[in-house]
Image: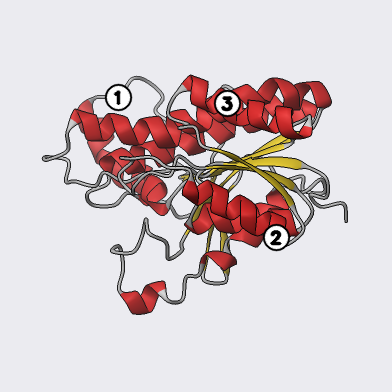
Amino acid sequence: MAGVEGRVVAVTGAGNGLGREYALVLAKAGAKIVVNDLGGARDGTGAGSAAADAVVAEIRAAGGEAVANHHSVATEAGGAAVVRTAIDAFGRIDGVVANAGILRDASFQKMTAADWDAVQQVHLYGAFYVVHAAWPHFREQRHGRIVVATSTSGIYGNFGQANYGAAKGGLIGLINTLAIEGKKNNVLANAIAPMAATRMTEDAAPSEALAKLAPEHVAPVVGYLLTDESTTTGNVYVVGGGQVHRVRQFQSTGVAFAAVPTIDQVADRWAEIDDLAGAVPGTNPVG
């Protein structure tokens, strides 16, 4: 199949861990890669060019094509610069992997507004800024592939990650709408929730569990979603340790009230409302 041969893909946060693995796998399959990485610490502080430059060197040494970009995606200008790097180096942009992320974990009681804002800016705003800059190119050429990195914390929640979970959940809402708006122009958008051992997760689980979650297991799924042949859009996949699962929201059979109910009437039928037996995939009733 054509796969990603000759396609230009920008991978954000590609200097380490999962992002690096995505860049390497895509380059090996023939894609031209913009390796974006600010080079900061796990909490988003600091900056440096070494991480992105090292991945570019690795790709080139293996015979692939890649250029580095060291901008922060947490600003509109930085997101636009990622796409501009692709256009300047390769003349086009065909795909975006919005992978860049930071962690500022704290219980909700102790979470500061600064910690909330920093995580939203990198994960949610960062994805928006890069994809928004690429979107006109995707529409004009009637081809585009978008993969955003969500998380099981965004799907199910996790203690100490209100900021991270909210950002990751927001990314699911983003790709749901991009899938609708992009479909007529062959612009597809999906989300993956990776389970992998990286510096982001090094203290999130026992070492024996993390040993089974190599980033290499996730990258082929991301690679497939970027191929010319993929027709998948608007979906969420949990990927890790050799397992790939699609996740979707469901709705119960529910209850239809003939008239505006009282609180007591709602309470009387709450067990029926809450019962997921016979649940079906949810849809947007106004879309």
Q: Residue at x 16, y 46 (%)?
A: 107
Q: Label 3: how many residues lie within 10 Å, few (<14), some (14-19) or many (20+)? A: many
Q: Which residue is mark 3?
A: 81
Q: Is residue 182 left or right of residue 173?
A: right
Q: Which residue is mark 2?
A: 61
Query: Which of the two labelled residues, at mark 2 and mark 3, occupies the earlier sequence position?
Result: 2
Q: Amino acid at mark 2?
A: Ala
Q: Nearer the viewer, mark 2 or mark 3?
A: 2
Q: Secondary structure at mark 1?
A: loop
Q: Nearer the viewer, mark 1 or mark 2?
A: 2
Q: How far apart, in angstroms, are the residues tagged by discs 2 and 3?
A: 25 Å
Q: Amino acid at mark 1?
A: Pro
Residue 143 image-quadrant placement: top right
Q: Label 2: how many residues lie within 10 Å, few (<14), some (14-19) or many (20+)? A: few
| Tags 1 and 2 touching, CB below 8 Å | no
**Above or below for 135 versus 186:** above
- Toward the viewer: 240 or 285? 240
- Whether residue 221 appears in this view of the structure is no
Q: Which residue is mark 1?
A: 261
Query: Which of the two labelled residues, at mark 1 and mark 2, occupies the earlier sequence position?
Result: 2
x then y, percent, for residue 36: 55, 41
